[in-house]
């Protein structure tokens, strides 16, 4: 029944279009076109294009209405809106009227045009203006579209908090509209926003909800959701689930090359290189330069892990070649976008000049253009002059900074060398002092000479000199040690001094008249029980740098 109703309306539109010249009922034609634009945008676009000289044959209100419908139909037909100049006419007219709904629509589509022209600031302004016009409106569809557009612009600008808030509002209006498809899109976008905020647990929750919606009402949307969930689990290093969802995406994907890369990269991170090779070689057959480049980079990483530098180098060269191609392509794309932006601005100017041609004299235009050209030329020359001078200043400053960094590095190297020599001299002086105070410790002066084991008895006075010499040579070593580790007793401090003077383990054992293993155990007790250090360092390492 609904199909027949739309077919009848479409036929009526054709009749109205054919009779527009005779009856002049163009307002009814445009109203009929608006009612059919959701179901038959391509046909409406074709019929609207049949209107001859709309800027002359339509009233100001109908021309603005016509401009809005043309932009809306182009968007519905997935056409490039960067060529559109009519939406500005709709914005200028409806924003000055009380028709807030059409004003909101005009701002909404003006925002989409600005997005395609890569002008995010202007796009945000139009979307926010549309949001104001829709205040308290029950047009939930357009409420959703405005928030969704805002979220997309915020996402492109990495404004993830604003993106999340916009998508949260879009989800609210999708729920009010009771539209499962809109709700699915909003939930998926909220998952993207949470991923941008590095809140992967929340991202998974919303992606799962979106996946349930997609399975129920829009199965084609599940591909992207599966892929994104796989990416989340890969970042969380839950590789089993990452592969599970990548496989689910492969079941519904037409172009599988990107997913083959995803699986290959997961297996690479799992160090399962045979599986990684299998999928990465498949993804290498892709026609997409980005996929090829990423695949070559991953294969180079795999071969590097397998210690095959020749193969890794070959794929790294391929990766660099693809990256150069991407950069060339990106540069070409940027030029095309710049030309489109210029063309769009030029068309807007021509459209304005066409409306004002009866008022503005051509001679005045030529004079203005000539003056502007001269000014632009002067500005260009001045800009080039000051720009080159500024670049030279920046270069000189960078060279000066680089030279100072080199000098600083040399000074630091010399300082480290001096510190090392000073430490060696201090330790030699320390050993010499102790060998004089306690002559029985002659191994201090001859550390490489092997002696027979013998009992080395150190008197209390000699212990006092040893501790005092240690404090003199190493800046109150024992006092700092007691302050840092108050559980140490006198015997522990004495042992630490012997270790600090780099005395042989055999000599320490002779001093205490015990076995070497006993000394080792005592060192371990001091380190673990009294100093509380369990990071793998030995007591000798700790005291050497203390």
Image: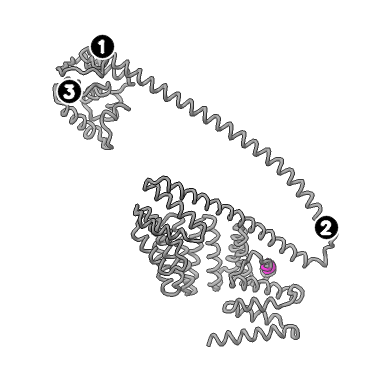
Foreground residue among 445 and 482: 445
The residue indicated by pointer 2 is: 366
Please tell me which of labels 1 and 2 falls first in the chain: 2
Magenta stretch, main secondary structure class = helix
Image quarter of the C terminus: top left
Q: Position of residue 389 (x, y in %)?
A: 68, 38
The verdict on residue 143 being magenta is no
Q: Quadrant of residue 498?
A: top left
Mark positioned earlier in the residue sequence (2 or 3): 2
Q: Secondary structure at mark 2?
A: helix
Check contact, mark 1 vs mark 2: CB within 8 A.
no
| Image vertical order of residue 194 relative to residue 54, above or below | above
Using residue 181 as the reference point, say whether residue 387 is left or right of it: right
- Residue situated in front as seen by the camera: 356 or 266: 266
Q: Residue 403 versus residue 271: which sits nearer the camera?
A: 271
Assign a secondary structure to mark 1.
helix
Whole-number angstrom distance, CA of label 1 to CA of label 2 = 103 Å
Query: From the viewer's perspective, is 255 left or right of 424?
Result: right
Q: Secondary structure at mark 3?
A: helix
Disc 2 to disc 3, C-alpha distance = 104 Å
Q: Give the residues drawn in magenta, as a range.
A: 86-90
**What residue is disc 1 on?**
436
On the image, numbered disc 3 is attached to which residue?
509
């Amino acid at each position: 029944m609904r199909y027949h109703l739309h077919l009848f309306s479409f036929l009526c539109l054709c009749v109205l279009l054919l009779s527009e010249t005779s009856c002049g009922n163009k307002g009814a034609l445009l109203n009929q076109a608006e009612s059919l634009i959701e179901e038959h945008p391509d046909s409406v676009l074709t019929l609207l294009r049949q209107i001859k000289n709309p800027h002359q044959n339509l009233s100001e209100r109908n021309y603005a209405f016509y401009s809005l419908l043309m932009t809306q139909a182009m968007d519905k037909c997935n056409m490039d809106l960067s060529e559109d100049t009519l939406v500005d006419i709709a914005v200028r007219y409806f924003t000055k009227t009380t028709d807030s709904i059409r004003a909101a629509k005009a701002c909404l589509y003006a925002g989409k045009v600005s997005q395609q022209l890569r002008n995010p600031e202007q796009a945000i302004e139009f979307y926010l203006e549309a949001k104001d016009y829709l205040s308290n409106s029950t047009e939930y569809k357009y409420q959703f579209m405005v928030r969704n557009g805002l979220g997309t612009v915020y996402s492109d600008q990495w404004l993830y908090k604003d993106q999340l808030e916009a998508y949260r509002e879009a989800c609210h209006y999708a729920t009010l509209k009771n539209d499962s498809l809109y709700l699915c899109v909003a939930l998926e976008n909220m998952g993207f926003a949470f991923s941008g905020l590095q809140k992967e647990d929340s991202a998974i929750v919303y992606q799962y909800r979106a996946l349930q919606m997609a399975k129920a009402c829009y199965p084609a949307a599940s591909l992207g959701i599966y892929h994104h969930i796989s990416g989340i689990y890969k970042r969380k290093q839950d590789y089993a689930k990452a592969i599970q969802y990548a496989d689910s995406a492969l079941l519904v994907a037409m172009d599988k090359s990107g997913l083959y890369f995803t699986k290959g990269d997961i297996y690479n991170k799992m160090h399962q290189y045979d599986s990684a090779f299998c999928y990465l070689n498949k993804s290498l057959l892709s026609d997409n330069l980005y996929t090829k480049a990423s695949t070559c980079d991953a294969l180079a990483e795999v071969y590097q892990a397998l210690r095959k530098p020749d193969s890794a180098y070959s794929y790294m060269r391929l990766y660099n070649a693809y990256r150069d191609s991407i950069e060339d392509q990106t540069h070409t794309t940027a030029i095309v976008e710049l030309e489109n932006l210029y063309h769009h601005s030029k068309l807007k100017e021509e459209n304005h000049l066409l409306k004002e041609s009866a008022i503005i004299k051509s001679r005045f235009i030529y004079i203005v253009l000539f003056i502007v050209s001269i000014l632009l030329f002067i500005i260009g020359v001045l800009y080039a002059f000051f720009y080159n001078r500024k670049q030279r200043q920046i270069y000189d400053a960078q060279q000066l900074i680089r030279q100072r960094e080199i000098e600083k590095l040399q000074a630091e190297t010399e300082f480290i060398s001096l510190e090392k020599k000073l430490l060696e001299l201090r330790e030699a002086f320390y050993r010499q002092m102790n060998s004089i105070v306690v002559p029985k410790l002659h191994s201090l002066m001859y550390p490489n000479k092997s002696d027979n084991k013998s009992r080395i008895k150190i008197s209390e006075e000699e212990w006092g000199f040893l501790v005092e010499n240690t404090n003199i040579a190493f800046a109150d070593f024992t006092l700092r040690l007691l302050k840092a580790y108050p559980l140490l007793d006198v015997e522990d401090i004495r042992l630490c001094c012997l270790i600090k003077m780099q005395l042989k383990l055999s000599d320490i054992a002779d001093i205490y008249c015990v076995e070497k293993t006993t000394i080792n155990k005592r060192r371990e007790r001091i380190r673990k029980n009294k100093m509380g250090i369990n990071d793998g360092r030995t007591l000798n390492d700790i005291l050497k740098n203390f």
